Image (cartoon, rainbow, N blue to C red):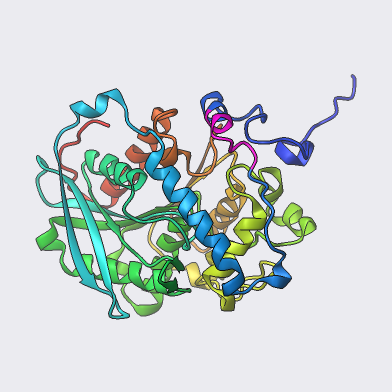
Amino acid sequence: MSNVEYTPPGRLGDPNMNVATDPRTHPKISELLQQMGMADMLTEFPEPASWSIESLTPYIAATDTAITGMYNNLDNELPTDADEPAIETTTQTIKGVDDNDITLYIYRLKSAQSPLPAVIYSHGGGMVNIATDNKAHRRWIRSLALQGVVAIMPNFRNAYTAAGHNPFPAGLNDCASAVQHIAANRISLGISSIVLQGESGGGNLAITTALKGKREGWVDAIAGVYATVPYISGAYGWPRERKLKELPSLVENDGYLLGMKSTAASAWFYGPAEIDNEGNATNPHAWPYHSSIEDLEGLPPFVLEMNELDPLRDEGMVFYRKLARAGVSVEAKVSLGVTHASALVFRKVVPAVHEAAARDVAGFARSLGGGGGEKGRL
């Protein structure tokens, strides 16, 4: 029997690999990223020794402009959209715990009968970047609403805004305020139950909102948590050896939409007091990967969804095992062939991925909260 040499996947086996040349990548995603010049995101960034809020702000601002612009300009429409049933869209403005205004964007089928399960969606961007009200996010909560849930998107404070720095726990406080307001107004909102859902940094906020609810005694308001491609470790500046030992996907998929140098800087910007320059988290309530078993005990049911070609894949998988050890009802899945947040960002090129994700989130919400009404079409 001949020896067959094993080649590890991605950059583990070939440091010159990128998301477009990786044979695991869905061909339509590979083609699009090549067209957009985003096949390799191993960008240069200031070294950690020079980091300060002032020095990083121009880089964070440029990232914010670039991603928000991409979200608004990327074609995510399908020919069948014209046949979708009518969606009722409303907004409410509430006061947060810090006496700030928080806008809630609320989507539901006009034909739906109350009460319905609610999915409170917190968007990605590392808790630092990306405008809440943009084309990609509006499409996502519309897709959720078409599945027969009330989809609600709070406009939480990013750590970066043009007006200034809003470090941890500003965004978390806003998400918690939104959940508590919605829970207190279930009847007027026509809601039967509440599930928290978010992707990337929004997955972090969905998890940490539940942790905050447990600490403060209102976690029973939350029926479940669905964290998509969760950004929860803060480990992006770890030495390579530690990444390989604990979270090898940070090396395997480095530069696949997310480069670890820029991601480490963004994580530090979120809360300098909560993480050091080498990615060592000092507060598990900012970086829930580092939660103790005791922190997690008693949380509501979870679903964690990771993507195969995502640097963040392994931290979600490790967190799944920790939740299971804590006795939490938890399900995990890994979507093959796709990159970070593909279901949200690449609806046009992989519509089946988008549809399956929306269907799964809404199905989880219905399984925990009754109601459900009729469903529309994606």
Q: Which of 299 and 353 is in front in this view?
A: 353
Magenta residues (range): 32-40
- Residue 194 screen position, x and y as percent: 27, 58
Left or right: 262, with 73 as reference point: right
Which quadrant of the view contains residue 177?
bottom left
Q: Where's the C terminus, which quadrant?
A: top left
Q: Nearer the viewer, residue 284 or 276?
A: 276
Residue at 41% in and 74% down: 170
Q: Residue placed farthest to the right in the image?
A: 2
- Residue 208 screen position, x and y as percent: 44, 67
Number of numbered callouts drawn: 0
Residue at 43% in and 57% down: 202
Residue at 76% in and 59% down: 242
Q: Nearer the viewer, residue 279 or 285?
A: 279
Relative height, residue 309 to residue 349 (above, below): below
Left or right: 363, with 74 as reference point: left
Relative height, residue 73 to residue 281 (above, below): above
Q: Where's the N terminus, which quadrant?
A: top right
Relative height, residue 293 to residue 29 (above, below): below
Residue at 46% in and 68% down: 159
Q: Is residue 139 visible from the viewing direction of this image?
A: yes
Q: Does the magenta stretch include residue 240?
A: no
- Residue 36 screen position, x and y as percent: 54, 34
- Residue 173 screen position, x and y as percent: 37, 73
Which quadrant of the view contains residue 13?
top right
Left or right: 211, with 41 as reference point: left
